[in-house]
């Protein structure tokens, strides 16, 4: 999800201001309401951690990483 797409999802492009708006953006991007998942996603990107596609996702959903947060991480890296 690009920033423009995210902003278009709000009425007139409005979202919270300051730190809350940044957190809302990352939560939406990671498709979660849990800030810990956001921080784990950022850690994976910053440390360039490689997770095997067939392993279970770090978010605890019991889905394979490939079908859960792998697309989000890939989009965030680009």
Image: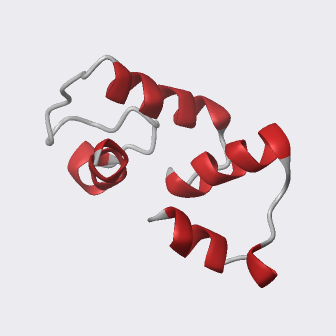
> For the point 29% across and 55% down, which residue is it?
71
> For the point 14% across and 41% down, which residue is it?
54
Image coords of residue 72 (percent x, y) = 36, 52
Image coords of residue 37 (percent x, y) = 54, 35
Q: Which color scheme did the rendering employ for the protein?
A: secondary structure
Quadrant the N terminus occupies: bottom left
Q: Nearer the viewer, residue 47 or 40?
A: 47
Left or right side of 16 for 54? left
Image coords of residue 18 (percent x, y) = 83, 42
Q: Is residue 50 above or below residue 17?
A: above
Left or right side of 7 for 78? left
Give the total of numbered labels: 0
Q: Residue furthest top?
A: 47
Q: Residue furthest right?
A: 17
> For the point 21% across and 50% down, which residue is it?
66
Residue 11 shows in the view: yes
Image coords of residue 27 (percent x, y) = 62, 49
> For the point 85% across and 51% down, which residue is it?
17
Residue 64 shows in the view: no
Q: Nearer the viewer, residue 76 or 55?
A: 76
Quarter-of-image position of residue 14: bottom right
């Amino acid at each position: 999800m690009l920033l423009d797409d995210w902003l278009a999802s709000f009425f007139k492009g409005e979202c919270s201001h300051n730190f809350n708006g940044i957190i809302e953006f990352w939560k939406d991007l990671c498709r979660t309401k849990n800030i810990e998942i956001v921080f784990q996603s950022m850690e994976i990107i910053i440390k360039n951690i490689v997770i095997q596609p067939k392993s279970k996702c770090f978010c605890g959903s019991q889905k394979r990483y490939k079908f859960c947060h792998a697309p989000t991480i890939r989009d965030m890296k680009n």
